[in-house]
Amino acid sequence: MERTKFILDEKDMPTHWYNIQADLPKPLPPVMHPATGKPITPDDLAPLFPMELIKQEVSTERWIEIPEEVREIYQLWRPTTLFRARRLEKALDTPAKIFYKYEGSSPPGSHKPNTAVAQAYYNKQEGIKRITTETGAGQWGSALSFGCGTFGIECKVYMVAISYHQKPYRRVMMETWGGKCVPSPSPDTKVGREMLAKWPDCPGSLGLAISEAVEDAVSRDDTHYALGSVLNHVLLHQTVIGLEAKQLMEMADVYPDIIVGCIGGGSNFAGLYLPFVKDKIEGKKPNLRIINVEPTSCPTLTKGPYAYDFGDSAGLTPLMKMYTLGHDFIPPPVHAGGLRYHGMAPIICHLYNLGLVEARAEHQLATFEAGITFARTEGIISAPEPNHAIKVVIDEALKCKESGESKTILLAHSGHGHVDMAAYDAYLSGKLSDYAYPKEKVDEALASLPKMPQA
Ligand SMILES: *Cc1c(COP(=O)(O)O)cnc(C)c1O
């Protein structure tokens, strides 16, 4: 029997996260204060985040120790398995070798608790009693509720309204782990009330939900805010995925030619590929291809300009240089809620700008078709987000079939779709449609980009 699963011992779980900022060929553009037009200082961020996380955000130390308490909670599901997708390979009749690192075995079913647990820990260390956040598909809200629960911290989640109604079970998961969840826009904040007055049926957006969570956090001393993606410290915590994957690929005696993953804010995929990008930057693997996959309905890297923009729609956050569709952009209601964000992790944008990684956009229907192929071969019913990456993996494997090349493809599989059955139901009953790129809407939103000296 040939090997299908590659598994590490618990004692071989990484003890440190990998910080790409130590190895970037050029440093990241600074994060700017919207009022002063100058780089932000740690004091600007102190009302929102614990100092340890603010330090991690700008650290250039290559290895950052994972606290023992965090590792103990990671042990509930880590290390995660690397699979060889033999049955998918066979179904595609491809000479490609397809591997996937699966993060769906965590309690909330995705990669997100890798950072949720770490963030709850550092907040607890600083005596914080309550954390607010936003959530799109509900994955992050459930992960943070779980993470806060493990350290006895209260958790308040502003959930994008469209997802709140499409995915009620995520709310119940949050409540089961002790969190509180409201649909955003909500009457609990000023920005929420203003939006509801203008547009009572507003489907919400991640940017708007961030505005509400930030407003709530800064209005109380015992409360901090947590972000589930985009920021440098979040990507740092997710590198535990890539560090395990590197050890496991070695165990399988292969190195990837192509790495594929989906990007919303970019954390799961960067978490897998940053330790591999290091090899590319160092010139050890110059031909390694890394493909970031996004939805055509929210084509941040493939269609957006590289510019300073706010992280949220109300303009409360600092300005980050990123590929962006404009902070006013409200993407169409596709089912991959976790990929509906107007911006992108500055680290990914920087690597893309330097030509170290690629990007591709995929239509919703084709991604579900790929997800069904995956479910019928590998068994796992994937979340709509990783289905975007699976679509590209299948395309690349079929190219190998044409060319006869036996490339090694590594997929970042970010989570299962057990709470997304309504989306599969819509697809299987022919009710799902593709969304064309809403060009006028994007032009409108881009017109409101903040005026900045372009660094
Ligand atoms: C949240 C989520 C994503 C998108 O977030 P990233 O920060 O881009 O990783 C992707 N897949 C799943 C399963 C998610 O829950």
Image (spheres, rainbow, N blue to C red):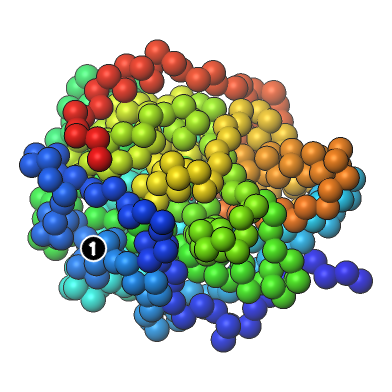
The location of residue 410, given as percent across then percent down, is: 68, 56
Vertical position of residue 21 compared to residue 437: above or below: below
Whether label 1 lies within 8 Å of ligand 1 gets the answer no
Is residue 156 rendered to the left or right of residue 9?
left
Mark 1 lies on a secondary structure that is helix
Residue sitting nearer the eye, 1 or 109: 1
Q: Quadrant of residue 283?
A: bottom right
| Residue 143, percent from left and from top | 43, 58
Asked if residue 179 can be seen in this view, the reply is no
Give x and y (percent) for residue 106. 54, 64
Q: Quadrant of residue 144?
A: bottom left
Q: Is residue 392 above or below residue 128?
A: above
State the residue position of label 1. Answer: 54
Residue at x 44% of width, y 77% of height: 16
In this rendering, position of residue 279 left or right of residue 93: left
- Residue at 19% across, 33% down: 452
Which residue extends farthest bottom?
Answer: 11
Q: Residue furthest front?
A: 283
Identify the residue shown where x is 20% and y is 68%: 51
Which sits in the foreground, 350 or 241? 350
Decide: is 122 above or below 309.
Answer: below
Q: Report if residue 308 is visible in the image.
A: yes
Is residue 44 or residue 254 the one in the foreground?
254
Query: Residue 323 at x, y = what percent?
Result: 39, 36
Q: Quadrant of the N terminus?
A: bottom right
Could you tell me which quadrant the C terminus lies in?
Answer: top left
Name which residue lies at 32% across and 28% down.
326
Q: Quadrant of residue 193?
A: top left
Residue occupying the far left of the picture: 36
Type of amino acid at the residue the image marks with label 1: Ile
